[in-house]
Structures are given as C-alpha cells and as structure tokens.
Image: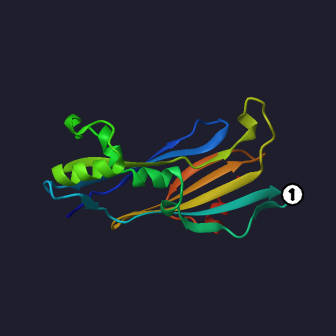
C-alpha cells in the first residue's frame, strides 16, 4: 500500500559565490516541505509529486564587434532525469530525511533510501527535502596563477517544477575584459534580454 506525499510551497535559496573568486556562480538549495501520514505496517511505498529541473543554457563570446551568441542554445534539458548530483538529491529524498530534526533516532541513522521510504510510509513524517545545485563558470583572472579573462558569458534559464509548484529563474555569469558578473534573476530572460545585461 502506497502513501501519498503532500508538499508545501518550495523555496529556492540562492547564495552567490565569493566576489573575485576563481569560479563565478551560485549555490542553489531547493527546500520542499513534505508530509506523509502514517500508514501502519502494511505501507511500504510513497507516491511522490513530479519533480523536474529544466535548464536552457546559452553562451556568448566577446569579440571585436561585441557580444556574439553561440548557437544553438543547449536545452531545455530536464536534469532530473540525468545522472548528476542535482537529480540524486531528489532520488535520495527519503534517506535525506535522516538529517531532519523530525526524524526519530530509533529508526536508525543510516538506512538506504528504500528502507527510509518504508519507515516513513509506515510511521509518517514531516520533513524538508533538500536539492542542491552549483552552476558555475571558471574565472581564470582570480586563480592561484592568474590568467586572462575568458571573454565568455553564459545564461541558464531554470524551470523547476515540484508537483503543481513552478519556480522560474535565470542565472547570468560573465568573465570578460569588460568586467565580471554573476546575477540570479527572478523569471525567465530570453537571449535578447540577457544580451542587454552583458557588460
């Protein structure tokens, strides 16, 4: 017997990398409040909401005429289906509950994801699912042995869906002789909008 997971409004926490560091970018933490009610000893599985992490990546190069977009853009690609750390955080969402303050220590400290899913299905739990991503761009100017700026810009349009909730954001990263930039913007910015933000 499967128990249904209900979720609250997900929150995307964004922490920028160090200014003038060797990697431009941000640490993303998606926090999803989740609840499963107790199903007793006959409950073994949990029906979780749909999870999608769409990314569309566009690159620009700076030449003597200005910024030139590389075509085509890559994506949209659903990273939730791939073999990557972001997808793995969601796949391991039940084992990840062990670190939550509501996890009962009597349930054990090192269950597999499958074992944790059964424990939660039988006993019920409210916890926070956490999914992380670290989209970044190398910035040679600030490495231990400094190099020339890359004269490259990159934007990533994010469409993150959990159940019926949708989060849309755009990241813009620039390493160039005109200056460096790392921005994380609300909403979706198409290529023409991003181009206007490049130095």
Q: Is residue 190 visible?
A: no
Colouring: rainbow
Q: Give the image quarter of residue 55.
A: bottom right
Front-most of 160 and 183?
160
- Residue 28: % across, % down: 48, 47
- Residue 14: % across, % down: 47, 46
Front-most of 65 and 52?
52
In the image, residue 149 sits, relative to residue 143, either above or below, namely below
Image point (16%, 49%), residue name: 123
Image point (61%, 65%), residue name: 193
In the image, residue 24 sits, relative to residue 105, either above or below, namely below
Residue at the extreme right: 64
- Residue 83: % across, % down: 54, 56
86 sits left or right of 161 in the view: right
Q: Secondary structure at mark 1?
A: loop
Q: Which residue is mark 1?
A: 64
């Amino acid at each position: 017997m499967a128990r249904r997971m209900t979720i609250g409004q997900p929150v995307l926490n964004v922490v920028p990398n160090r200014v003038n560091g060797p990697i431009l970018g941000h640490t993303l933490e998606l926090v999803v409040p989740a609840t499963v009610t107790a199903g007793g000893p006959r409950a073994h599985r949990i029906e979780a909401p749909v999870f999608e992490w769409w990314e569309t990546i566009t690159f620009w190069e700076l030449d003597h005429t200005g910024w030139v977009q590389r075509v085509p853009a890559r994506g949209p690609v659903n990273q939730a289906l791939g073999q990557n750390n972001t997808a793995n955080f969601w796949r391991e969402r039940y084992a990840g509950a062990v670190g939550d303050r509501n996890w009962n220590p009597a349930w054990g400290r090192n269950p597999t994801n499958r074992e944790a899913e059964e424990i939660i299905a039988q006993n019920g739990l409210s916890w926070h699912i956490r999914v992380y991503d670290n989209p970044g761009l190398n910035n040679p100017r600030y490495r231990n042995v400094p190099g020339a700026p890359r004269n490259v810009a990159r934007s990533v349009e994010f469409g993150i869906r959990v159940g019926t909730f949708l989060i849309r954001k755009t990241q813009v990263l620039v390493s160039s002789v005109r200056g460096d930039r790392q921005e994380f913007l609300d909403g979706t910015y198409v290529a023409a909008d991003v181009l206007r933000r490049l130095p």
